[in-house]
Structure formats: structure tokens, C-alpha cells
């Protein structure tokens, strides 16, 4: 069912995992998106205030292999990336104050990014059909986005909730990429992430693999099955430490990479290779 069906999980056991932690280059202090390509390559980017740059990383050491400039676009606030068979999609839709009107999705060839230093881009713009004010009133501050996932031919966008009072809901929109178009997105689903506030229960990144959606918050990974119009929480894994985790990519059904931004109090930018216990 669509439009506002919410599934609550007041209690759910946490599953355990093990991890390897790598400190990343200072260039990636604001890393907000990572994408697994193969066992020797990750693609990553920083968020707003940085250049329109993709970074190729060694997944074992976290070292930068090379930098790729994306032509024809700006990094207003890049927040996540998603991959299909041919293209990499970059979400230029960070919207902390819920007042942006220039939201967009950028598309590039990930294969070109591997072999070239500068690549061309395509883009589409969009708006949320249910947003009527910029910004809306406090109780409706749910048009920030840090998560985009490719699944079943669509780009799925999960909002980062900033409502006051906090209601813990991430709204879900879907769109098919169409170059040089402007699309009005319709809210299709909603998920209740939690009720502790946006620092614990807002979606900050995601991926889709092996039939499941993997969403991250600052403090945990949530694994969802989507079936017959419903998101069902299957498992969740609480991180060993708390920091500004805004990027996740799945390697195998029991292995993921997660990255966090630098924050003065919470520490350096890091890459985690996490093995999830089934």
C-alpha cells in the first residue's frame, strides 16, 4: 500500500558483527557516498562545499588511487551514490534546511570513471510533490535526503527526518532517471526508523543488494525486505562507535563497507569493512 503506511518496531534485537577500521585521507574529510565496484575498487565522493570529484579507492587500504572530475555539474550538496549495470547516479539533494529548490540527480558512466580523469555527465532535476513551503513548518521538516538506492529499475530516495517534534519517519520516493527533465516526485512509502531523534534515527545512506535494502543511521545498520508494498525489518546491527556515518555499500550478503565524515568531537574520517553475522 502507498502514501503513509508506517511499520513500527518498538523492540528488535541487535545482531553482532566484526569490523576492520581504516583512517582515510584528509581529502575525504566529508565523505558522504561510497560504492563497491569490485574487490579492488570503491568509488567515493565528498558532500557540499567540495568540487565535483569522484575518488577511486583501494578497498583494503582506503588509499586514493585516482581522482575523477565530473564535468558540467556542481557539488551543491552531493549526499549519496547508486549503481546500476552501466551508470553511477549521484544525488545532489542534500537539504539540511529543507528550502532548496534545485535538487538534482547526476548520471555518469562508472566505466569511464575508472579509465578517465575527466568524465561527462547528464542530470535531471526534481521536486517533492508534497512540499508546499520552503522551508515547511517544523513538524514537516522531512525533505532533506542523504540516501539513494537503485533497485528494480528505479532510484529510491529515503528522506532524512528533521521534524520537530521528531516523528522518526523516513519517506520514500521513486523515480526513473530521464536526462534533461524536471520530475515531481510522489511519496510512495514511509518507514518508522525510531523515536530518539535525528542523531540516532534518521537515514543517512543506503544500498540495495541480494534482495534487501541496507539503510544506515549514525548508530546502526538496518536491513529491510520490501515485498507487496511493505518494508519489513529483518535485522539491525549497532555500530561499535558513534559518529557521522553517511555512506554504505554492500559487498556480499554478509559484508558491507561504511564510511564516516570527520567531526571535531567524534573523530577522523574512517572506512569500515564490516562482516555481519547471519
Image (cartoon, helix red, strand yellow):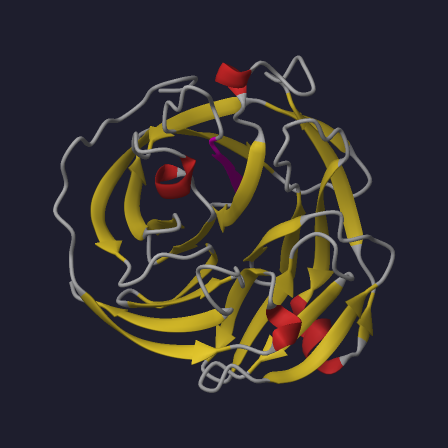
The residue located at (29%, 44%) in the rendering is 224
The residue located at (43%, 17%) in the rendering is 3
Q: Is residue 50 left or right of residue 265?
A: right
Q: Is residue 140 left or right of residue 216?
A: right
Q: Is residue 6 above or below residue 92?
A: above
Q: Is residue 132 above or below residue 40?
A: above
Could you tell me which quadrant the N terminus lies in?
top left
At which x and y percent is residue 89?
64, 54
Magenta segment includes 74: no
Q: Report the magenta residues as a range.
A: 155-161
Magenta residues: mostly which secondary structure? strand
Could you tell me which quadrant the C terminus lies in?
bottom left
At which x and y percent is residue 212?
33, 50
Query: Between residues 66 and 227, which one lies in front from this camera angle?
Result: 66
The residue located at (74%, 60%) in the rendering is 50
**What residue occupies the far front of the structure in this picture?**
265
Query: Between residues 62 and 71, which one lies in front from this camera angle?
Result: 62
Q: Is residue 210 left or right of residue 60?
A: left
The residue located at (46%, 65%) in the rendering is 259
Query: Between residues 253 and 270, which one lies in front from this camera angle?
Result: 270
At which x and y percent is residue 92?
69, 46
Magenta segment includes 157: yes
**What residue occupies the far right of the structure in this picture?**
72
Visible residue check, residue 132: yes
At which x and y percent is residue 17?
20, 67
Amino acid at each position: 500500500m502507498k502514501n503513509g503506511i508506517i511499520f513500527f518496531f518498538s523492540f528488535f534485537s541487535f545482531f553482532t558483527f566484526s569490523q576492520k577500521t581504516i583512517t582515510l585521507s584528509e581529502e575525504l574529510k566529508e565523505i558522504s557516498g561510497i560504492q563497491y565496484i569490485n574487490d579492488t575498487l570503491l568509488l567515493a565522493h565528498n558532500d557540499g562545499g567540495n568540487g565535483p570529484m569522484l575518488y577511486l579507492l583501494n578497498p583494503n587500504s582506503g588509499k586514493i588511487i585516482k581522482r575523477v572530475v565530473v564535468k558540467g555539474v556542481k557539488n551543491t550538496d552531493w549526499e549519496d551514490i547508486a549503481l546500476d549495470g552501466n551508470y553511477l547516479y549521484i544525488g545532489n539533494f542534500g537539504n539540511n534546511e529543507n528550502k532548496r529548490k534545485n535538487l538534482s540527480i547526476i548520471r555518469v558512466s562508472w566505466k569511464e570513471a575508472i579509465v578517465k580523469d575527466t568524465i561527462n555527465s547528464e542530470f535531471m532535476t526534481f521536486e517533492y510533490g508534497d512540499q508546499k513551503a520552503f522551508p515547511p513548518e517544523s513538524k514537516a521538516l522531512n525533505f532533506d535526503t542523504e540516501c539513494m538506492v537503485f533497485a528494480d529499475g528505479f532510484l529510491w530516495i529515503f528522506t532524512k527526518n528533521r521534524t520537530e517534534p521528531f516523528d522518526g519517519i523516513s519517506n520514500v520516493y521513486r523515480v526513473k532517471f530521464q536526462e534533461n527533465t524536471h520530475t515531481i516526485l510522489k511519496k510512495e512509502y514511509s518507514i518508522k526508523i525510531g523515536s530518539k531523534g535525528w542523531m540516532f534515527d534518521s537515514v543517512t545512506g543506503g544500498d540495495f543488494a541480494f534482495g534487501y535494502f541496507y539503510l544506515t543511521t549514525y548508530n546502526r545498520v538496518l536491513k529491510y525486505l520490501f515485498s507487496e508494498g511493505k518494508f519489513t525489518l529483518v535485522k539491525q546491527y549497532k555500530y561499535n562507535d558513534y559518529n557521522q556515518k553517511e555512506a554504505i555499500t554492500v559487498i556480499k550478503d554478509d559484508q558491507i563497507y561504511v564510511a564516516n565524515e570527520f567531526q571535531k568531537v567524534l573523530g577522523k574520517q574512517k572506512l569500515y569493512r564490516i562482516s555481519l553475522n547471519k
